[in-house]
Image (cartoon, rainbow, N blue to C red):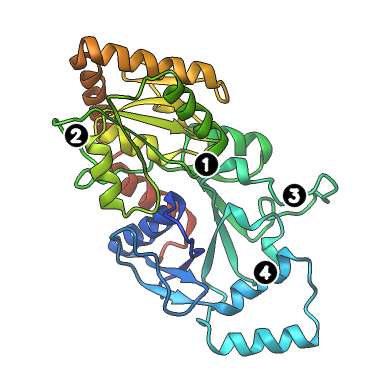
């Protein structure tokens, strides 16, 4: 009997690269003979802003346990009645299954369904200690618990971070893949700059306003990418010449990679995880938090484009070639299958 893999997945109100990658993992695993599911909280809910179809199950009971754990609430008589009621409406998870949690649920997640083995899909190592206290008893947490089989990360930087923090932890690094049918090079670029405003909104506000104040954007169309479907995001990026990266302490940082795949010249923060793909041959990394340097690099790109647009466009094409060669779906599938064959029993 195949081991069932349940990926615990929040329902976000906004487009999230982290959620998309959880769906991608389930899609890849099922297409390679594994038995994997998305596990959501609210019955009937699923994320629809990207086109990935996977088996989805629901467990209000498990998410209620997580909520009690977060708030430090012990399971008293009343709460047990609530959990028992929700269990009737929840997927029955047998003890031979594996629960895969994102890193956001904190150090004590081992207390949820304690008899069931767990894997942490840690897409942002810099969130790892968000729910640790400096007064924690470090003798036991989800990363050193005997029922934790492994942690999966998505960048060299994240691997170094986790390996140094938890020397005994079994860590696997997977390469994330870009769907080249959606995110691909587009020749007919416009005088358009795009960016995502959700993170580091203060930095976004400063960079854009300084550029406006200095009258650098008068001939450029400025597009904020927010609340868009995956296809809409790709369409904006394909038409854009520049993408402004406001990566912030990222485990990998997907938006700049997608922009590069579409042929954008990317300027901005690497967010640490992005150091492996922010190559100076075709992008312009900026020191995190250095607003003036950020503005100056954007101005340099605009002035270069005004004199010789091909110089900027060629960098965008080079970026696209690099990304689609190194971060493609084939590599992601290879890594995913290899990792999970190492984690689960041989009969998976």
Which SS class for mark 4? Answer: helix
* Mark 1 crowd level (few <14, some 14–19, many ≥20, 10 Å Cα): few
Task: Give how far across and how far down residue 107 sits, in percent.
Answer: 70, 54
* Mark 4 crowd level (few <14, some 14–19, many ≥20, 10 Å Cα): few
**Above-or-below relation of 24 to 323:** below
Q: Nearer the viewer, mark 2 or mark 1?
A: 1
Q: Which residue is mark 4?
A: 67
Whichever of labels 1 and 3 marks the residue nearer the N terminus, that label is: 3
Q: Which residue is mark 3?
A: 132
Whichever of labels 4 and 3 marks the residue nearer the N terminus, that label is: 4
* Mark 3 crowd level (few <14, some 14–19, many ≥20, 10 Å Cα): some
Quarter placement of the N terminus: bottom left
Is 24 or 12 nearer to us in this picture? 12
> Is there any visible trace of residue 76 in the rendered image?
yes
Residue 281's disc is none
Residue furthest toward the left?
188
Is 17 or 338 nearer to us in this picture? 17
Q: Nearer the viewer, mark 1 or mark 3?
A: 1
Residue 185's disc is 2
Q: In the picture provided, is 60 more to the left or to the right than 317?
A: right
Whichever of labels 1 and 4 marks the residue nearer the N terminus, that label is: 4
The residue sitting at 54% across, 35% down in the picture is: 248
- How far apart marks 1 and 4 lie (CA) works out to 25 Å
Task: Give how far across and how far down residue 13 sits, in percent.
Answer: 47, 61
């Amino acid at each position: 009997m195949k081991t069932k893999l349940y990926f615990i997945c929040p329902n976000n109100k906004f487009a999230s690269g982290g959620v998309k990658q959880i769906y991608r993992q389930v899609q890849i695993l099922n297409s390679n003979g594994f038995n994997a599911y998305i596990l959501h909280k609210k019955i009937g809910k699923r994320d629809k802003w990207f086109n990935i179809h996977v088996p989805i199950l629901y467990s209000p009971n498990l998410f209620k346990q997580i909520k009690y754990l977060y708030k430090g609430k012990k399971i008293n008589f009343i709460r047990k009645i609530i959990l028992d009621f929700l269990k009737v409406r929840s997927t029955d998870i047998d003890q031979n299954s594996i629960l895969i949690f994102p890193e956001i649920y904190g150090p004590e997640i081992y207390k949820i369904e304690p008899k069931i083995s767990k894997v942490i899909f840690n897409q942002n190592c810099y969130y790892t200690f968000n729910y640790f206290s400096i007064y924690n008893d470090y003798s036991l947490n989800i990363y050193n618990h005997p029922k934790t089989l492994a942690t999966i990360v998505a960048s060299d930087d994240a691997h170094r971070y986790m390996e140094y923090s938890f020397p005994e932890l079994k860590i696997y690094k997977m390469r994330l893949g870009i769907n080249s049918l959606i995110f691909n090079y587009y020749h007919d670029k416009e005088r358009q700059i795009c960016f995502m405003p959700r993170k580091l909104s203060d930095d976004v506000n400063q960079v854009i306003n300084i550029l406006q104040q200095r009258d650098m954007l008068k001939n450029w169309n400025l597009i904020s990418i927010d609340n868009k479907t995956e296809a809409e995001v790709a369409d904006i990026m394909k038409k854009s010449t520049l993408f402004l990266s406001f990566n912030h302490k990222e485990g990998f940082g997907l938006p700049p990679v997608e922009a590069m795949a579409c042929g954008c010249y990317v300027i901005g923060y690497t967010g640490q995880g992005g150091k492996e793909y922010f190559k100076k041959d075709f992008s312009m990394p900026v020191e995190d938090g250095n607003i003036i340097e950020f503005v100056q690099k954007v101005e340099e790109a605009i002035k270069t484009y005004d004199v010789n647009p091909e110089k900027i466009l060629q960098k965008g094409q080079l970026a696209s070639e690099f990304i689609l060669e190194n971060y493609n779906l084939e590599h992601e599938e290879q890594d995913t299958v290899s990792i999970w064959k190492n984690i689960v029993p041989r009969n998976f």
